[in-house]
Amino acid sequence: MPKKKVVLNFPPHLIDQPIISHLIRDHGLEVNILKARITPNEWGRMVVELRGNGGNLEDGLNHLAQTGVVVEPLAREIRWLEERCVQCTACTAPCPTHALGVERSDMTITFDRELCIACELCLNACPYGAIEMSFD
Amino acid sequence: MAKTIQEINEKIRQGKAVVCTAEEIIGVVKEKGLKQAAAQVDVVTTGTFGPMCSSGAYFNMGHSKPRIKMGGGRVTLNDIPAYAGFAAVDLFIGATAIAEDDPRNKVFPGKFIYGGGHVIEDLVAGKDVRLTANAYGTDCYPRRALDTWIRLTDINEAVLFNMRNAYQNYNVAVNRGDRVIYTYMGVLQPRMRNANYCTAGQFSPLLNDPLYRTVGVGTRIFLGGGVGFVVSQGTQHNPGVRRTERGVPKVPAGTLSLTGDLKQMSPRWLRGASFTGYGVTLTVGVGLPIPILDEEILHFASVSDDDLVAPVVDYSEAYPNCQPEILAEVTVAQLRSGEITVDGKKVITAGHSSYARAREIALTLKQWIEAGTFLLTDPVAYLPAPESGYAFKPLKERPWEPPQEISDN
């Protein structure tokens, strides 16, 4: 099933609309909410991974655009700089998806980019500048 | 069968010494038994690579023309203040020093991007570092200001001098409060969502010589990628704490003061570190060789992560208020597994001392000894032992009061 990670920006007037429900019900999409910040009277921001069959993914994204949601590709990406890393493992504790993990046999860091949701919690945990946020 | 350092050194010179890392020796002792292993193995190498705040370096910068008296003046290295209360061009920079205009924790939590530890790393990496000095000027040292690039190869002495390194055992930090806290043990999530530890466990230098039977003043060691020496016990040395049956402290205990020529060292083993919301420090690589003089010393050096325990301490309440409460005792093996149990709750663990790098140090030191380039030393004096009465005291505060005014009447 095709999938896509996107950032959804909700204008304040759409905050009270059940937009994600429509995506699921009307377009048959699987929605995995990775990060969300919705506050009354402000722009909301949600990072989601969408999965859907055939043209459903495109249809769903078009529907979002028509309702006024600004859809952006997930342009930010966490980069693990192995040459700066000292393998202390401090970054692994806050990682909610286990994208950063420990190979227990030799206590070295593993980084699975596919699992990373760019939540940035690891940035504060690394004392060595070995984790960077990059923008496309 | 007892051996002497001289006998072991003779074997090292002949390329015949048998050396094991503190990890390898565990299996050797299990397989061959203590007696046979003690007869065969000459040296056990240890290692640790973790943040060690009481580290620093001193330098002699050489004299400028005309001369400047930095002593008593103000000096910075890459904007980081250095201590200049010595003769004209001798300086000391500490690992945790930060620039006067660093935002610190004004916007909490502060980032502490650059500090004394990073200056030391940059110098060791061969980078240019900016030296500024402001002085008051004297007849013999007339110059008042200096602003120049320097690099490690151009200055005279450059010496790493650490007043406390290689803590024998360390706390496991948790946060029982209800907000995130930013500590020298890293970011601690509220309601004990994570536990951060800082020990090299079975590789740790002083956990392998728990009663300081071989280490002492003058012991030659691996320090920062070069060769260094033990100066003495480090600050806060506290040998008289509770110990396991094997003599291993259950809480932080002994420490080492270390020194070595910075010009031999490498940025792989001296790294500036930035702790969000806390400050900067230097992560130091230390490796101590343990001569296997007798079976008892080997017994101590074959300790494994299953035998080592560390205290779990709440850094939201007990630590900042200097309260002695320990929430649990956990083994290093449990800490390394990624999860411990505290008060019936499963808590994920993460480290601040690099196990992988500790192993690399122990292996490097082993290679140096096998190559015959690194000889062992008899200590000039031993460190204060557990029963010595030497202890680490809290500060006794006697608040200052303004002097009473003397009345005219």
Image (tube, coloured by chain):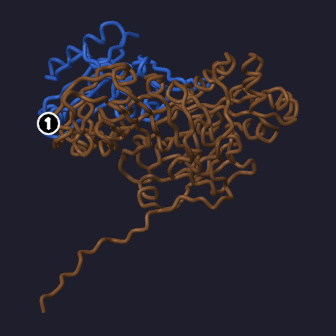
Chain colours: A blue, B brown
Amino acid bearing label 1: Glu
Structural crowding at the residue carrying mark 1, measured as other residues with C-alpha within 10 Å and reported as few (<14), some (14–19) or many (≥20): some
In the depicted view, which residue is nearer to us: B49 or A115? B49
Percent position of residue B66, x then y: 19, 30
Q: Residue furthest front?
A: B139
Q: Is residue B207 visible?
A: no
Percent position of residue B362, x then y: 62, 26
In the rendered view of the protein, which quadrant contains the N terminus of chain B? top right
- In the displayed structure, B23 sits above or below B242; it is above
The residue sitting at 27% across, 36% down in the picture is B80
- In the displayed structure, A108 sits above or below B140; it is above
Q: Is residue B384 visible?
A: yes
Percent position of residue B107, x then y: 22, 43
Q: Residue furthest bottom?
A: B409
The residue at which mark 1 appears reads as A42
Q: Is residue B120 left or right of residue B208?
A: left
- In the displayed structure, A56 sits above or below B215; it is above
Q: Is residue B145 left or right of residue B365?
A: left
Q: Chain of mark 1?
A: A
